[in-house]
Image (cartoon, rainbow, N blue to C red):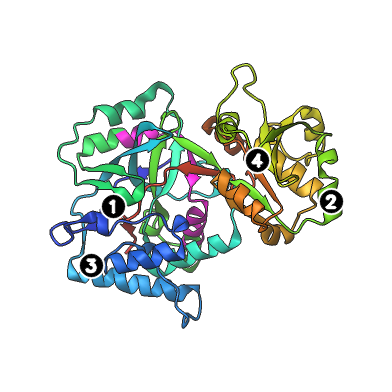
Protein backbone atom coordinates (compact mmCIF):
# COMPACT_ATOMS: atom_id res chain seq x y z
CA UNK A 1 0.00 0.00 0.00
CA UNK A 2 2.50 2.67 1.12
CA UNK A 3 5.30 3.60 -1.28
CA UNK A 4 8.40 4.28 0.82
CA UNK A 5 11.65 5.60 -0.66
CA UNK A 6 15.14 6.70 0.39
CA UNK A 7 16.21 10.29 -0.21
CA UNK A 8 19.28 12.52 -0.20
CA UNK A 9 18.86 14.19 3.16
CA UNK A 10 20.08 17.66 4.05
CA UNK A 11 21.87 17.98 7.37
CA UNK A 12 24.37 20.10 9.25
CA UNK A 13 27.99 19.94 8.13
CA UNK A 14 29.61 18.75 11.36
CA UNK A 15 33.02 19.98 10.26
CA UNK A 16 31.65 23.53 10.56
CA UNK A 17 28.92 22.99 13.17
CA UNK A 18 30.84 21.02 15.75
CA UNK A 19 28.25 21.26 18.55
CA UNK A 20 24.89 20.09 17.21
CA UNK A 21 23.24 20.67 20.57
CA UNK A 22 23.37 24.42 19.87
CA UNK A 23 21.49 24.18 16.58
CA UNK A 24 18.96 21.35 17.02
CA UNK A 25 15.61 22.60 18.34
CA UNK A 26 12.22 21.42 19.56
CA UNK A 27 9.38 20.94 17.06
CA UNK A 28 7.73 24.19 16.03
CA UNK A 29 4.34 23.47 17.60
CA UNK A 30 5.78 23.27 21.12
CA UNK A 31 8.09 26.29 20.82
CA UNK A 32 6.84 29.32 22.71
CA UNK A 33 7.73 32.87 21.63
CA UNK A 34 10.28 33.05 24.47
CA UNK A 35 11.88 29.76 23.45
CA UNK A 36 11.95 30.98 19.86
CA UNK A 37 13.83 34.16 20.77
CA UNK A 38 16.21 32.27 23.08
CA UNK A 39 17.05 29.82 20.27
CA UNK A 40 17.68 32.71 17.87
CA UNK A 41 20.19 34.12 20.38
CA UNK A 42 21.75 30.70 21.06
CA UNK A 43 23.13 30.34 17.56
CA UNK A 44 22.90 32.16 14.24
CA UNK A 45 22.49 28.70 12.70
CA UNK A 46 19.85 27.28 15.01
CA UNK A 47 17.28 25.26 13.07
CA UNK A 48 14.46 27.31 14.56
CA UNK A 49 15.21 29.86 11.84
CA UNK A 50 14.01 27.36 9.26
CA UNK A 51 11.33 25.40 11.10
CA UNK A 52 9.75 28.13 13.25
CA UNK A 53 10.83 31.42 11.71
CA UNK A 54 10.05 34.53 13.75
CA UNK A 55 7.25 36.76 12.56
CA UNK A 56 8.01 40.41 11.84
CA UNK A 57 5.81 43.48 12.26
CA UNK A 58 6.49 44.26 8.59
CA UNK A 59 5.18 40.88 7.34
CA UNK A 60 2.44 41.38 4.75
CA UNK A 61 1.20 37.79 5.06
CA UNK A 62 2.04 34.36 6.47
CA UNK A 63 4.19 33.81 3.37
CA UNK A 64 6.62 36.59 4.38
CA UNK A 65 8.30 34.73 7.26
CA UNK A 66 8.65 31.56 5.18
CA UNK A 67 10.22 33.56 2.37
CA UNK A 68 12.84 34.70 4.90
CA UNK A 69 13.32 31.09 6.02
CA UNK A 70 13.76 30.01 2.38
CA UNK A 71 16.43 32.69 1.89
CA UNK A 72 18.17 31.50 5.07
CA UNK A 73 18.14 27.92 3.78
CA UNK A 74 19.78 29.01 0.51
CA UNK A 75 22.39 31.03 2.43
CA UNK A 76 23.31 28.11 4.68
CA UNK A 77 23.65 25.78 1.69
CA UNK A 78 25.86 28.33 -0.11
CA UNK A 79 28.08 28.69 2.98
CA UNK A 80 28.34 24.92 3.48
CA UNK A 81 26.61 25.08 6.87
CA UNK A 82 24.17 22.54 5.47
CA UNK A 83 25.17 19.75 3.13
CA UNK A 84 23.26 17.34 0.93
CA UNK A 85 24.07 13.66 1.33
CA UNK A 86 25.55 12.21 -1.85
CA UNK A 87 23.73 8.87 -1.71
CA UNK A 88 19.99 8.36 -1.11
CA UNK A 89 19.38 6.85 2.31
CA UNK A 90 16.78 5.72 4.78
CA UNK A 91 17.74 7.17 8.15
CA UNK A 92 17.46 4.99 11.25
CA UNK A 93 16.83 6.92 14.48
CA UNK A 94 17.26 5.54 17.99
CA UNK A 95 15.66 7.92 20.49
CA UNK A 96 16.54 7.39 24.18
CA UNK A 97 14.45 9.17 26.80
CA UNK A 98 12.96 8.78 30.27
CA UNK A 99 9.23 8.65 30.94
CA UNK A 100 7.71 8.39 34.44
CA UNK A 101 11.07 7.20 35.75
CA UNK A 102 11.46 4.49 33.10
CA UNK A 103 14.28 4.39 30.56
CA UNK A 104 12.92 4.08 27.01
CA UNK A 105 14.36 3.63 23.52
CA UNK A 106 12.16 4.10 20.45
CA UNK A 107 13.49 3.07 17.06
CA UNK A 108 12.14 4.63 13.88
CA UNK A 109 13.06 5.24 10.25
CA UNK A 110 13.02 8.55 8.40
CA UNK A 111 12.07 8.14 4.75
CA UNK A 112 9.96 9.58 1.96
CA UNK A 113 6.38 8.37 1.52
CA UNK A 114 4.38 8.92 -1.64
CA UNK A 115 1.45 11.29 -1.10
CA UNK A 116 -1.95 9.66 -1.37
CA UNK A 117 -5.39 11.25 -1.08
CA UNK A 118 -7.11 10.56 2.23
CA UNK A 119 -9.92 8.57 0.64
CA UNK A 120 -7.50 5.94 -0.67
CA UNK A 121 -6.90 4.92 2.97
CA UNK A 122 -3.19 4.27 2.39
CA UNK A 123 -2.27 7.08 4.76
CA UNK A 124 -4.91 7.27 7.48
CA UNK A 125 -5.78 10.12 9.81
CA UNK A 126 -7.49 10.16 13.19
CA UNK A 127 -7.80 13.87 14.04
CA UNK A 128 -9.60 16.83 12.55
CA UNK A 129 -7.49 19.57 11.01
CA UNK A 130 -7.51 23.13 12.41
CA UNK A 131 -7.78 25.62 9.50
CA UNK A 132 -5.19 28.11 10.79
CA UNK A 133 -2.50 25.47 11.35
CA UNK A 134 -3.22 24.01 7.93
CA UNK A 135 -2.72 27.41 6.29
CA UNK A 136 0.59 27.85 8.12
CA UNK A 137 1.90 24.47 6.98
CA UNK A 138 0.81 25.04 3.39
CA UNK A 139 2.51 28.45 3.33
CA UNK A 140 5.70 26.98 4.80
CA UNK A 141 6.08 24.14 2.31
CA UNK A 142 4.99 26.33 -0.62
CA UNK A 143 7.58 29.03 0.11
CA UNK A 144 10.45 26.80 1.27
CA UNK A 145 9.87 23.82 -1.04
CA UNK A 146 11.15 21.65 1.79
CA UNK A 147 9.94 19.41 4.61
CA UNK A 148 11.97 20.79 7.49
CA UNK A 149 10.65 18.22 9.97
CA UNK A 150 9.15 14.77 9.42
CA UNK A 151 5.56 14.07 10.27
CA UNK A 152 5.20 11.05 12.57
CA UNK A 153 3.33 7.92 11.54
CA UNK A 154 3.10 4.36 12.78
CA UNK A 155 2.29 1.00 11.26
CA UNK A 156 1.02 -2.36 12.44
CA UNK A 157 3.79 -4.93 12.33
CA UNK A 158 2.08 -8.30 12.64
CA UNK A 159 4.74 -10.97 12.56
CA UNK A 160 7.38 -8.40 13.41
CA UNK A 161 9.05 -8.44 9.97
CA UNK A 162 9.81 -4.72 9.84
CA UNK A 163 10.96 -4.60 13.47
CA UNK A 164 13.15 -7.66 12.92
CA UNK A 165 14.85 -6.00 9.95
CA UNK A 166 15.48 -2.85 11.96
CA UNK A 167 16.85 -4.75 14.95
CA UNK A 168 19.24 -6.98 12.97
CA UNK A 169 20.51 -4.50 10.38
CA UNK A 170 24.28 -4.04 10.27
CA UNK A 171 24.44 -0.32 10.79
CA UNK A 172 28.09 0.66 10.89
CA UNK A 173 29.11 4.09 12.09
CA UNK A 174 26.33 6.55 12.97
CA UNK A 175 26.18 9.92 11.23
CA UNK A 176 24.80 11.65 14.33
CA UNK A 177 25.28 10.87 18.01
CA UNK A 178 24.11 13.51 20.44
CA UNK A 179 22.82 14.15 23.96
CA UNK A 180 20.27 16.95 24.27
CA UNK A 181 19.71 18.34 27.75
CA UNK A 182 17.25 20.86 26.31
CA UNK A 183 15.08 17.95 25.13
CA UNK A 184 14.40 16.25 28.49
CA UNK A 185 17.94 14.81 28.61
CA UNK A 186 17.30 12.73 25.51
CA UNK A 187 19.94 10.88 23.52
CA UNK A 188 19.87 10.33 19.77
CA UNK A 189 21.80 8.03 17.43
CA UNK A 190 21.14 8.21 13.69
CA UNK A 191 22.48 6.04 10.90
CA UNK A 192 22.20 6.53 7.12
CA UNK A 193 21.26 3.21 5.53
CA UNK A 194 22.40 3.26 1.91
CA UNK A 195 22.81 -0.44 1.06
CA UNK A 196 20.26 -1.05 -1.74
CA UNK A 197 19.33 -4.60 -0.70
CA UNK A 198 18.57 -3.58 2.89
CA UNK A 199 16.63 -0.52 1.71
CA UNK A 200 14.61 -2.75 -0.59
CA UNK A 201 13.80 -5.15 2.23
CA UNK A 202 12.71 -2.29 4.49
CA UNK A 203 10.46 -0.78 1.83
CA UNK A 204 8.97 -4.18 0.98
CA UNK A 205 8.26 -4.94 4.65
CA UNK A 206 6.05 -1.83 4.83
CA UNK A 207 4.62 -1.85 1.31
CA UNK A 208 1.43 -3.72 2.20
CA UNK A 209 0.67 -1.74 5.32
CA UNK A 210 -1.37 1.43 5.78
CA UNK A 211 0.34 4.22 7.67
CA UNK A 212 -1.40 5.98 10.56
CA UNK A 213 -0.50 9.61 11.13
CA UNK A 214 0.46 10.16 14.75
CA UNK A 215 1.47 13.80 14.47
CA UNK A 216 1.48 15.97 11.37
CA UNK A 217 -2.05 15.97 9.97
CA UNK A 218 -1.65 19.64 9.00
CA UNK A 219 1.71 19.07 7.32
CA UNK A 220 0.31 16.17 5.32
CA UNK A 221 -2.71 18.24 4.34
CA UNK A 222 -0.43 21.09 3.25
CA UNK A 223 1.75 18.75 1.19
CA UNK A 224 -1.35 17.31 -0.50
CA UNK A 225 -2.64 20.78 -1.32
CA UNK A 226 0.70 21.86 -2.82
CA UNK A 227 0.88 18.67 -4.89
CA UNK A 228 -2.66 19.37 -6.18
CA UNK A 229 -1.67 22.94 -7.12
CA UNK A 230 1.29 21.69 -9.13
CA UNK A 231 -0.71 18.96 -10.80
CA UNK A 232 -3.44 21.42 -11.78
CA UNK A 233 -0.86 23.68 -13.46
CA UNK A 234 0.94 20.74 -15.10
CA UNK A 235 -1.26 17.63 -15.56
CA UNK A 236 1.63 15.80 -17.24
CA UNK A 237 3.70 16.06 -14.04
CA UNK A 238 5.61 12.84 -13.37
CA UNK A 239 4.32 10.51 -10.69
CA UNK A 240 7.83 10.64 -9.27
CA UNK A 241 7.97 14.43 -9.09
CA UNK A 242 9.75 15.43 -5.85
CA UNK A 243 6.55 17.17 -4.67
CA UNK A 244 4.74 13.81 -4.82
CA UNK A 245 6.48 12.74 -1.61
CA UNK A 246 6.50 13.80 2.01
CA UNK A 247 9.10 13.05 4.69
CA UNK A 248 7.90 10.82 7.52
CA UNK A 249 9.36 9.26 10.65
CA UNK A 250 7.86 5.77 10.95
CA UNK A 251 7.66 3.47 13.97
CA UNK A 252 5.83 0.32 15.00
CA UNK A 253 2.47 0.55 16.79
CA UNK A 254 3.65 -2.29 19.04
CA UNK A 255 6.74 -0.41 20.24
CA UNK A 256 6.46 -0.36 24.06
CA UNK A 257 7.96 3.14 24.02
CA UNK A 258 5.19 4.50 21.81
CA UNK A 259 3.55 6.82 24.34
CA UNK A 260 0.27 8.63 23.76
CA UNK A 261 -0.73 11.51 26.03
CA UNK A 262 -4.07 13.28 26.30
CA UNK A 263 -4.84 16.93 25.75
CA UNK A 264 -6.97 18.06 28.69
CA UNK A 265 -9.81 20.49 28.02
CA UNK A 266 -10.13 23.98 29.49
CA UNK A 267 -13.46 25.78 29.19
CA UNK A 268 -14.60 29.37 29.78
CA UNK A 269 -17.54 31.60 28.89
CA UNK A 270 -20.12 29.26 30.44
CA UNK A 271 -23.33 31.02 31.59
CA UNK A 272 -23.88 30.67 35.35
CA UNK A 273 -27.25 28.84 35.01
CA UNK A 274 -25.59 26.24 32.77
CA UNK A 275 -22.64 25.85 35.13
CA UNK A 276 -24.92 25.63 38.18
CA UNK A 277 -26.97 22.80 36.71
CA UNK A 278 -24.04 20.85 35.24
CA UNK A 279 -23.55 18.35 38.06
CA UNK A 280 -27.17 17.22 37.90
CA UNK A 281 -26.98 16.91 34.11
CA UNK A 282 -23.78 14.84 34.35
CA UNK A 283 -25.46 12.27 36.57
CA UNK A 284 -27.62 11.15 33.64
CA UNK A 285 -24.49 9.75 31.98
CA UNK A 286 -21.84 9.32 34.67
CA UNK A 287 -21.30 7.87 38.09
CA UNK A 288 -19.86 10.82 40.03
CA UNK A 289 -17.33 10.52 42.85
CA UNK A 290 -15.75 13.41 44.78
CA UNK A 291 -12.03 13.47 45.67
CA UNK A 292 -10.76 16.16 48.06
CA UNK A 293 -7.71 18.07 46.85
CA UNK A 294 -6.09 18.25 50.29
CA UNK A 295 -5.11 14.55 50.20
CA UNK A 296 -1.33 14.13 49.90
CA UNK A 297 -1.60 11.44 47.25
CA UNK A 298 -4.32 13.06 45.17
CA UNK A 299 -2.28 13.59 41.99
CA UNK A 300 -0.79 10.11 42.17
CA UNK A 301 -4.35 8.77 42.34
CA UNK A 302 -5.36 10.90 39.36
CA UNK A 303 -2.40 9.63 37.32
CA UNK A 304 -3.22 6.01 38.13
CA UNK A 305 -6.88 6.57 37.30
CA UNK A 306 -6.19 8.15 33.91
CA UNK A 307 -3.21 6.07 32.76
CA UNK A 308 -3.69 2.56 34.13
CA UNK A 309 -6.10 0.16 32.47
CA UNK A 310 -8.13 -1.92 34.92
CA UNK A 311 -7.84 -5.52 33.61
CA UNK A 312 -11.33 -6.18 34.93
CA UNK A 313 -12.70 -3.10 33.11
CA UNK A 314 -10.57 -2.63 29.98
CA UNK A 315 -13.21 -0.48 28.26
CA UNK A 316 -13.99 1.77 31.22
CA UNK A 317 -14.22 5.46 30.32
CA UNK A 318 -13.28 7.79 33.14
CA UNK A 319 -12.39 11.49 33.35
CA UNK A 320 -11.84 14.09 36.05
CA UNK A 321 -13.61 17.46 36.30
CA UNK A 322 -12.42 20.50 38.26
CA UNK A 323 -14.13 23.85 38.69
CA UNK A 324 -17.50 23.07 40.24
CA UNK A 325 -15.89 23.43 43.70
CA UNK A 326 -12.49 24.84 44.64
CA UNK A 327 -11.56 22.08 47.09
CA UNK A 328 -12.34 18.91 45.16
CA UNK A 329 -12.21 16.98 41.93
CA UNK A 330 -15.18 15.18 40.45
CA UNK A 331 -14.38 11.75 39.02
CA UNK A 332 -16.76 10.86 36.19
CA UNK A 333 -17.24 7.24 35.13
CA UNK A 334 -19.54 6.44 32.23
CA UNK A 335 -22.26 4.24 33.74
CA UNK A 336 -24.52 3.82 30.72
CA UNK A 337 -22.94 3.56 27.27
CA UNK A 338 -26.39 3.17 25.74
CA UNK A 339 -27.31 6.62 27.07
CA UNK A 340 -24.11 8.28 25.85
CA UNK A 341 -24.47 6.56 22.48
CA UNK A 342 -28.02 7.84 22.00
CA UNK A 343 -26.90 11.38 22.83
CA UNK A 344 -24.22 11.35 20.12
CA UNK A 345 -24.75 11.72 16.35
CA UNK A 346 -26.06 8.53 14.77
CA UNK A 347 -23.54 8.82 11.94
CA UNK A 348 -20.68 8.04 14.31
CA UNK A 349 -19.54 4.48 14.94
CA UNK A 350 -19.75 2.67 18.25
CA UNK A 351 -15.94 2.67 18.33
CA UNK A 352 -15.95 6.47 18.20
CA UNK A 353 -18.67 6.70 20.83
CA UNK A 354 -16.58 4.82 23.41
CA UNK A 355 -13.57 7.14 23.41
CA UNK A 356 -13.12 9.38 26.43
CA UNK A 357 -12.32 12.39 24.24
CA UNK A 358 -15.38 11.77 22.05
CA UNK A 359 -17.68 11.51 25.05
CA UNK A 360 -16.13 14.62 26.61
CA UNK A 361 -16.52 16.55 23.37
CA UNK A 362 -19.98 15.40 22.30
CA UNK A 363 -21.72 14.98 25.67
CA UNK A 364 -20.13 17.49 28.02
CA UNK A 365 -18.79 20.26 25.78
CA UNK A 366 -21.34 20.28 22.98
CA UNK A 367 -24.54 18.98 24.60
CA UNK A 368 -24.37 20.03 28.25
CA UNK A 369 -22.23 23.17 27.99
CA UNK A 370 -23.66 24.13 24.58
CA UNK A 371 -20.29 25.05 23.08
CA UNK A 372 -20.55 24.51 19.35
CA UNK A 373 -19.50 26.11 16.07
CA UNK A 374 -17.48 29.32 16.27
CA UNK A 375 -17.82 29.43 20.08
CA UNK A 376 -15.37 26.51 20.37
CA UNK A 377 -12.38 28.58 19.26
CA UNK A 378 -13.15 31.31 21.84
CA UNK A 379 -14.18 29.12 24.77
CA UNK A 380 -11.95 26.03 24.48
CA UNK A 381 -8.25 25.61 25.20
CA UNK A 382 -5.98 22.61 25.70
CA UNK A 383 -3.22 21.55 28.10
CA UNK A 384 -1.01 18.47 28.35
CA UNK A 385 -0.35 19.07 32.05
CA UNK A 386 -3.24 18.23 34.40
CA UNK A 387 -1.88 20.42 37.22
CA UNK A 388 -1.43 23.34 34.82
CA UNK A 389 -5.05 22.90 33.72
CA UNK A 390 -6.30 22.94 37.30
CA UNK A 391 -4.18 25.98 38.18
CA UNK A 392 -5.63 27.92 35.24
CA UNK A 393 -9.09 27.28 36.60
CA UNK A 394 -8.04 28.14 40.16
CA UNK A 395 -6.53 31.37 38.85
CA UNK A 396 -9.78 32.38 37.19
CA UNK A 397 -8.66 32.17 33.57
CA UNK A 398 -11.06 29.30 32.88
CA UNK A 399 -14.15 27.91 34.60
CA UNK A 400 -13.66 24.18 34.09
CA UNK A 401 -10.81 21.73 33.51
CA UNK A 402 -11.65 18.33 32.10
CA UNK A 403 -8.82 15.82 32.56
CA UNK A 404 -8.95 12.92 30.11
CA UNK A 405 -7.61 9.42 29.56
CA UNK A 406 -5.12 9.05 26.71
CA UNK A 407 -6.18 6.98 23.71
CA UNK A 408 -4.33 3.71 23.13
CA UNK A 409 -2.65 3.05 19.73
CA UNK A 410 -5.09 0.23 18.96
CA UNK A 411 -8.01 2.61 19.58
CA UNK A 412 -6.52 5.20 17.24
CA UNK A 413 -6.10 2.52 14.58
CA UNK A 414 -9.77 1.52 14.98
CA UNK A 415 -10.90 5.11 14.45
CA UNK A 416 -8.66 5.62 11.42
CA UNK A 417 -9.68 2.28 9.89
CA UNK A 418 -13.33 3.31 10.19
CA UNK A 419 -12.55 6.50 8.25
CA UNK A 420 -13.52 8.69 11.21
CA UNK A 421 -11.67 11.51 12.90
CA UNK A 422 -11.47 12.33 16.57
CA UNK A 423 -12.00 15.90 17.83
CA UNK A 424 -9.10 18.29 17.36
CA UNK A 425 -6.27 18.03 19.87
CA UNK A 426 -7.15 14.47 20.90
CA UNK A 427 -3.67 12.96 21.09
CA UNK A 428 -0.05 13.90 21.66
CA UNK A 429 2.52 11.26 20.85
CA UNK A 430 5.36 11.64 23.30
CA UNK A 431 8.10 12.61 23.05
CA UNK A 432 8.18 14.44 19.74
CA UNK A 433 11.59 14.20 18.04
CA UNK A 434 13.68 17.36 17.87
CA UNK A 435 14.03 18.98 14.45
CA UNK A 436 17.19 19.65 12.47
CA UNK A 437 18.79 16.20 12.26
CA UNK A 438 17.93 15.64 8.58
CA UNK A 439 15.32 17.05 6.20
CA UNK A 440 14.00 16.84 2.65
CA UNK A 441 14.11 19.47 -0.08
CA UNK A 442 12.02 19.11 -3.22
CA UNK A 443 14.22 21.27 -5.49
Which residue has dot 1 on it? 437
Closer to the N terminus: mark 4 or mark 3?
3
Decide which of tag 4 and tag 2 comes sooner along the chain.
Answer: 2
Sequence-wise first label, 3 or 1: 3
At 24% across and 27% down in the image, what residue appears? 168
Name the residue beneath numbered marker 2: 274
* Marks 4 and 2 in Cβ contact (< 8 Å): no
Q: CA distance from mark 4 to mark 1?
A: 34 Å
Q: Which residues are magenta?
A: 202-226
Name the image quarter holding residue 93.
top left
Quarter of the picture holding the C terminus: bottom left
What residue sits right under mark 3 in the picture?
A: 77
- Residue 225 locus on image (x, y percent): 51, 60
Answer yes or no: do the residues labelled 1 and 2 have beta carbons within 8 Å? Answer: no
Magenta stretch: includes residue 367: no
- In this figure, which residue is indicated by the disc labeled 4? 357
- How crowded pointer 1 is (Cα within 10 Å; few <14, some 14-19, many 20+) is rated as many
Which residue shows up at 41% across the image and 36% down it? 99
Direction bottom: furthest residue: 58
Distance from disc 4 to disc 2, alpha carbons, whole Å, reads 21 Å
Mark 1 vs mark 2, foreground winner is 2
Left or right position of 243 against 437: right
Rounded to the nearest angstrom, the CA distance separating label 4 from label 3 is 45 Å
Amino acid sequence: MADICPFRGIRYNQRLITDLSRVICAPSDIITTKMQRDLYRQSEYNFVRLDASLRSASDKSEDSRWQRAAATLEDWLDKGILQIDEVPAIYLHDYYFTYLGKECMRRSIIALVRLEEWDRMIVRRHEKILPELYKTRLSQVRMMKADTSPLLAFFEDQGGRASSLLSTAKLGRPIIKINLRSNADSRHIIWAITEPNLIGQMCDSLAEKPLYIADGHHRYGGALALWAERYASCPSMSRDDPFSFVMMELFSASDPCLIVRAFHRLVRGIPEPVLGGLLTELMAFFEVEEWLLDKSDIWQKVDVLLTNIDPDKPDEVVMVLFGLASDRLFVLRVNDFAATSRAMPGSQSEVYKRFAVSIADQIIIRKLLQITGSKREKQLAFSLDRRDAVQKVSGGRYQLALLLQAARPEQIISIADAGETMPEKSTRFYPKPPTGFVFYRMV
